[in-house]
Amino acid sequence: MKGGVAIGAAAAVPGMASASDSGGTAPPDTSDSDGVETEVIAEGENYKLYRTDAGDRVSLGKFYTGGPKEGKLEHVNLNESNAVEVSTNEEVTISQATALETVESSSIEIVERSKNVNRELDSCSQDYCDGFTYTHVQTGFSVEFTDATDALGKNAVAEAVSILADIYLKTKWARWVSGLAGIVAGTLLSIATGAKYTVSPWDQDKGWVFTNPVVELGVSNGWDTHANNLTNIQDNERAHIGSLDGRCG
């Protein structure tokens, strides 16, 4: 490992995600109090190590991209660890090696399994251009936590949501979900009857007389839930998840 990683409330949202960025308009900004910023600070053959920043709370999350622990997430709140002294007024530097050691010694597993949710829905009714049709899609993730969400706490759940969004969504939609991570976590806690949930954007044409393309963000208390059964949290109007045919302008 080389160098050090600045960890603090002043760190910027990185422009990185595991999936490519394409299509739709940029999602709207969200309140800082709702969002969780994520940054990949180290990578190995079977893992990504994340820093998450939610205002006065800084944490680490180690997501396993392969191997026997694939889909799992280990988590440690640096405010409660002895690795570094975390301050909201100044950046704190922790080396990648120390971050990995901290996760190894102090983390707990909070996600038992996770997976991408990706399916085609109905045909788009918008007449974008002659001879072109677009099929609506649902793309998000399902997660099974190791414990009930109220036992893990809203903060840890929000940080897990932000990391999983970065893993499983296209860049701009990952940022959208991360910006709403606190709201998503609060909703999951409010509908909690177990440990399995789906968090997913999907697109549709919304309206009665005049319809517009809309991407909705929804959640459910269940594994791999279809878009029709998700509880809507927020709309991103005049957008679709996938890119439209370039001939349509």
Image (cartoon, rainbow, N blue to C red):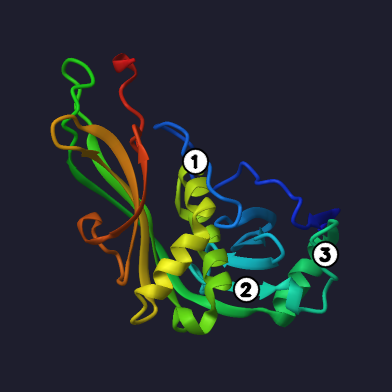
Q: Are marks 2 and 1 in contact (CB under 8 Å)?
A: no
Nearer the camera: disc 3 or disc 1: 3
Mark 2 Cα-neighbour bin, 10 Å: few <14, some 14–19, many ≥20: many
Q: Is residue 238 above or below residue 40?
A: above
Quadrant occupied by the C terminus: top left
Residue nearest the observer in this picture, 187 or 119: 187
Q: Are marks 3 and 2 in contact (CB under 8 Å)?
A: no
Disc 2 is placed on an element classified as strand
Q: Which residue is mark 1?
A: 172
Q: Is residue 167 above or below residue 242?
A: below
Residue 67: x percent and y percent? Answer: 53, 69
Q: CA distance from mark 3 to mark 2?
A: 19 Å
Give the amino acid at mark 2.
Answer: His
Residue 54: x percent and y percent? Answer: 65, 60
Give the amino acid at mark 1.
Answer: Lys
Residue 58: x percent and y percent? Answer: 71, 65
Q: Earlier in the sequence, mark 2 or mark 1?
A: 2
Q: Residue at x 40, y 67 (%)?
A: 187
**Residue situated furthest left in the rendering:** 209
Give the amino acid at mark 3.
Answer: Ser
Q: Which residue is mark 2?
A: 75
The part of the image, by quadrant, that contains residue 125 is: top left
Q: Which residue is mark 3?
A: 87
